[in-house]
Image (spheres, rainbow, N blue to C red):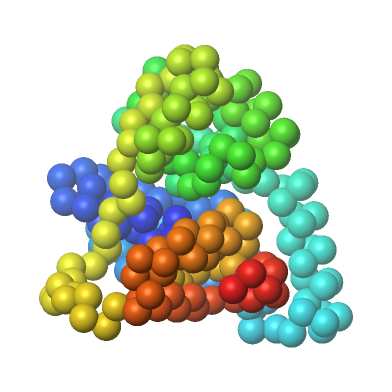
Amino acid sequence: GGVQNILATLANNLDIDNEVSVLSLIKNSNHSHFKYNDGISIYSILDFSSHGLKKMKRKNIKYYYLRVKEEISKKFLLKNKLAQEKDLILNSDVIIFGRIETAILLFKYLGNCFINKTVIVRDSMNLKFYDNNIRNNMKKYFPKYVTHFIVSSDECIKQYYNFFDKKIKILKIYNPIGINPKKVGKKSNKTIIAVGRMDRQKGFDMLIDVFKMLIIDFPDWKLQIYGDGINKGKLEKII
């Protein structure tokens, strides 16, 4: 996914001059989708890799049994498992979170470990897509523990400055690119391609609306969207 790709890219680049460890809450597979440098240590709190849920049909009884088992493990084992990794946090100079939800969880259970640390949280979505529970926890924990909050647009900077009452340092840093393109497109095909999960927060509906305005002045351009998700049917209706 996008967050995993960004974290792998950051870890590999930071590993050049630093000792880097990656802590994952859930391990669903024995193989990462993205390659990490050999010198990077990777830890997992809960290991569900043997369940193989990604290869199962969702209507399979075994699938639902294992899903329930995983949710019970998260609820009753996660806190104690996190406490076992406390030294990893205490011995780190800088902690970077790729998801707001993960940061909230660790602040809740291991808050004191983050005092006097450089703690960076990267936002992966627009503020409006977070529910009230997450928003309340952000206001509760972030001003106390977060030293730098990273967003990817000027719009998000304004939103979060107002949301946090300017109590947190907010920076705009675009997502890193994990590959180096060998060729630069000449735009001769006049085609825009978008790839992603068709969920509300991905904003494909806005992309389609913008493209409808674009083709008024550029009628020979095309938009191609690739992906799947719960909003696919809705998107097809507005095309």
Q: With 210 as the anchor, is 27 left or right in this view?
A: right
Q: With 108 as the anchor, is 1 left or right in this view?
A: left
Identify whether 66 is placed above or below 12: below
The count of marks equals 0
Q: Position of residue 198 (x, y in %)?
A: 59, 67
Residue depicted at x 42% and y 67%:
216
Residue nearer the viewer, 206 or 194? 206
Residue nearer the viewer, 133 or 64? 133
Give the farthest residue toward the front. 216
Identify whether 48 is placed above or below 15: below
Identify whether 221 is placed above or below 200: below
Residue depicted at x 52% and y 15%:
165
| Quadrant (top left, top right, bottom left, bottom right) of the C terminus | bottom right
Q: Is residue 145 visible?
A: no
Q: Is residue 153 visible?
A: yes
Q: Position of residue 106 (x, y in %)?
A: 57, 36
Identify whether 2 is placed above or below 105: below
Q: Quadrant of the rendered structure where residue 220 is?
A: bottom left
Give the farthest residue toward the right. 61
Residue depicted at x 31% and y 41%:
173
Residue depicted at x 38% and y 22%:
169
Q: Position of residue 189 (x, y in %)?
A: 27, 83
Q: Position of residue 144 (x, y in %)?
A: 52, 17
Q: Quadrant of the rendered structure where residue 138 is?
A: top right
